[in-house]
Image (cartoon, rainbow, N blue to C red):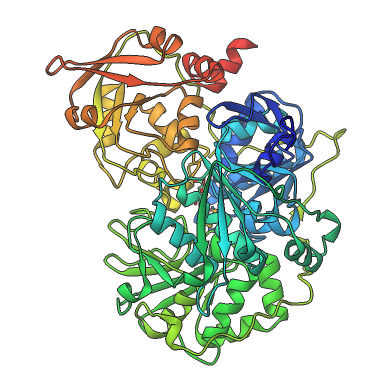
């Protein structure tokens, strides 16, 4: 081989290099990429748009920005509606398409209506990687990072390792794409994808439909992956044709001799139906082990399993049968388009006849909005997350599974292995997914200046404080491993309604972990949190950083951090310090710690000395920052930094 010839490039690398504006694409180094497309939701997106305005941008720069009203759709009073009206008027004014409530869940709708192989997508939601199923580089981020990208700035991230997941074989009857991603969670745990992109390769890829790829790419978020990517091939093209968007399709693929940082082999034919036990998406067992467990509630849909294919397979199982008397069975189609096609193809009537409740196309029960389980009841969900309390019930027991396990169990009232049933008929795709586009509102022209309406629920965006030279503060809370953003800032309608109102949402901080936390933080004025591995896993919600910041939290000492949450902490001026397990064991809740020479240490080596006021013990903590991150953090976060340099 010619020694100057470069080795083949992975698809992920090609996508990154095509939009690279800063840094070198070497794993572990900071890079900046531009976003061709942006998606915003009605939870994190509200703060993101407020921040976009605070930063003073005149109009969005990327060619396609879409605001989705999909999470906070059930309104019990005017507060969500206030936020929706703000988002609708801000979208119109600043150049974003607006997707109305009920038009569908952002990821599903975005894939159907806007995804474009070869382009980049940044979203205010952690499941943005779903569009990686169509050959996009699709990444979830916190609201401030998205606000900057909306103004045309780069999105900065650490160049991930690119791991190929080599698929062979084909799925057997009753085994689904959901079982594939649950199998990866079983093998690798929720930490397994940290700092990585999974690129799916091998002959098994061609056996997976586009919706199956969507499920896998979507739920890669639960592995803490930066994103997942599939090639765009003839299967993708066929789906785009049915969507009426073949013109947006183009092939993208890795080079045949592409090099990867690592390889995972996965035989699709060896995967079996799986269930995640309550508490974490990686507590995965074969369905046989959970079979027979009584359940009071079954849910199918969400951004993970809300596709046409999921709805079709659920209907095949339900047709001609009745939901078990002790079960409440609710179906959340991923988009209005899917619901419209379900009506056209006569799926709706079969589901209704079986006793299923068909919800509006929204996130609904997934982040705890509506259909909250009774206390002590078990809920089986073809969704993606089951962090404690997320359903809206304290001490909830949420199991995760595929759509067909959900449907089979809805009929029996217990978790059921569907493999005893005759196989489903072969999937029939409708000839086209043509549907009304009445759910989209286009932006105003750039020469128009329509009014932006802020209702009383919209409060000012707070500003972080510069990092102090010497931080002396109590440990407000000590927690263990895998604390998710659902633990820090819970879902549920009571809390989610305050995403544009930081003082109000701060009252919910760590509600299910320690109901006294907020009072303790307020009394102390300043404080520190001590945590274990993967602190802040899960969602991209900024509330999990900005609310603690509002309550005086100035540093988090953790064994490790999840990517998006670490970025959110820096963007809000909270110092994310890594400590070793011995320090975690030794430090006690309630004791005072002093972080000596904090500013100077962050500016120099990133090595910070911590002294226990209780017993004089000294620990070393580490905060490895890029120069950009360091300047932002020291200034008190991105808004404070931007104000300072203007
Ligand atoms: C989630 O699934 O946890 C959410 C609700 O969609 C969040 C977004 C949010 O909390 O605003 C996410 O995934 O990022
Ligand atoms: Fe909505 Fe649930 Fe998907 Fe989050 S995971 S975007 S709450 S459906």
Above/below status of 547 relative to 102: above
Q: Position of residue 160 (x, y in %)?
A: 55, 37
**Which residue is at the front of the view, 125 or 558?**
558
Residue 75 seen in render: no
The C terminus sits in image quarter: top right
Q: Position of residue 448 (x, y in %)?
A: 85, 35
Does residue 617 appear left or right of residue 71 in this picture?
left
Q: How many numbered dots are placed on residues in this image?
A: 0
**Which residue is at the front of the view, 121 or 176?**
176
Q: In which quarter of the image is residue 284?
A: bottom left
Q: Position of residue 644 (x, y in %)?
A: 58, 11
Above/below status of 6 relative to 511: above
At horizontal 86% and vertical 39% (from top left) the residue drawn is 445
Above/below status of 223 relative to 286: above
At horizontal 40% and vertical 42% (from top left) the residue drawn is 489
Does residue 25 appear left or right of residue 64 in this picture?
left
At horizontal 39% and vertical 36% (from top left) the residue drawn is 506
**Which residue is at the front of the view, 567 or 591?**
567
The N terminus sits in image quarter: top right
């Amino acid at each position: 081989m010619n020694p100057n010839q470069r080795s083949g490039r992975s698809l992920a690398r090609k996508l990154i290099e095509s939009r690279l504006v800063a840094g070198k694409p070497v794993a572990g180094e900071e890079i900046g990429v531009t976003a061709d497309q942006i998606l915003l939701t009605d939870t994190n997106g509200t703060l993101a748009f407020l921040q976009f305005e605070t930063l003073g941008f005149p109009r969005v720069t990327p060619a396609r920005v879409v605001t989705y009203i999909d999470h906070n759709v059930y309104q019990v009073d005017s507060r969500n509606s206030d936020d929706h009206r703000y988002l609708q008027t801000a979208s119109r004014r600043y150049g974003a398409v607006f997707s109305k409530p009920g038009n569908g869940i952002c990821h599903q709708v975005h894939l159907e209506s806007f995804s474009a192989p070869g382009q980049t997508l940044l979203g205010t939601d952690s499941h943005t990687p779903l569009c990686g199923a169509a050959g996009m580089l699709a990444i979830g981020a916190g609201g401030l990072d998205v606000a900057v990208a909306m103004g045309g700035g780069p999105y900065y991230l650490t160049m991930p390792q690119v791991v190929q997941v080599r698929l062979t074989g084909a799925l057997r009857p009753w085994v689904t794409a959901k079982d594939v991603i649950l199998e990866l969670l079983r093998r690798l745990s929720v930490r397994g994808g940290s700092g990585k992109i999974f690129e799916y390769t091998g002959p098994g890829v061609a056996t997976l439909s586009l919706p199956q790829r969507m499920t896998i790419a979507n739920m890669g978020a639960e592995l803490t992956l930066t994103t997942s990517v599939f090639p765009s091939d003839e299967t993708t093209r066929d789906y785009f044709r049915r969507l009426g968007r073949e013109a947006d399709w183009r092939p993208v693929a890795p080079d045949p001799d592409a090099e990867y940082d690592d390889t995972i082999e996965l035989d699709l034919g060896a995967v079996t139906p799986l269930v995640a036990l309550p508490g974490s998406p990686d507590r995965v067992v074969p369905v046989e082990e959970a079979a027979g467990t009584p359940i009071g509630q079954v849910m199918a849909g969400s951004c993970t399993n809300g596709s046409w294919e999921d709805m079709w397979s659920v209907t095949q199982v339900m047709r001609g049968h009745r939901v078990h008397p002790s079960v409440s069975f609710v179906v959340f189609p991923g988009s209005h388009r899917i619901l419209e096609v379900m009506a056209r193809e006569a799926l709706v009537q079969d589901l209704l006849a079986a006793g299923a409740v068909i919800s509006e196309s929204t996130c609904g029960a997934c982040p705890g909005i509506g259909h909250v389980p009774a206390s002590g009841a078990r809920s089986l969900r073809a969704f993606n997350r089951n962090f404690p309390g997320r359903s809206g019930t304290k001490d909830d027991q949420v199991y995760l599974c595929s759509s067909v396990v959900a449907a089979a169990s809805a009929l029996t009232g217990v978790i059921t292995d569907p493999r005893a049933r005759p196989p489903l008929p072969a999937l029939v795709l409708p000839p086209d997914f043509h549907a009304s586009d009445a759910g989209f509102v286009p932006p105003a022209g750039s020469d128009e200046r329509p009014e932006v309406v802020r209702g009383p629920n919209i409060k000012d965006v707070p500003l972080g404080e510069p990092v102090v030279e010497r931080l002396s503060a109590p440990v407000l809370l000590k927690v263990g491993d895998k604390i998710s953003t659902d633990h820090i800032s819970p879902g549920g309608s009571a809390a989610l309604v305050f995403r544009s109102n930081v003082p109000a949402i701060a009252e919910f901080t760590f509600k299910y972990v320690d109901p006294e936390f907020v009072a303790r933080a307020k009394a102390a004025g300043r404080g520190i949190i001590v945590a274990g591995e993967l602190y802040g896993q899960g969602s991209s919600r900024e509330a999990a950083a900005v609310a603690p910041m509002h309550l005086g939290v100035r540093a988090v000492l953790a064994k490790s951090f999840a990517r998006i949450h670490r970025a959110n902490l820096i963007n809000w001026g909270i110092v994310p310090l890594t400590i070793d397990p011995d320090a975690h064991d030794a430090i006690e809740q309630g004791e005072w710690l002093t972080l000596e020479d904090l500013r100077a240490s962050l500016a120099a080596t990133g090595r910070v000395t911590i002294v226990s006021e209780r017993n004089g013990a000294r620990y070393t903590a580490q905060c490895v920052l890029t120069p950009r991150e360091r300047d932002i953090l020291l200034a008190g976060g991105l808004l404070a930094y931007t104000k300072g340099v203007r």
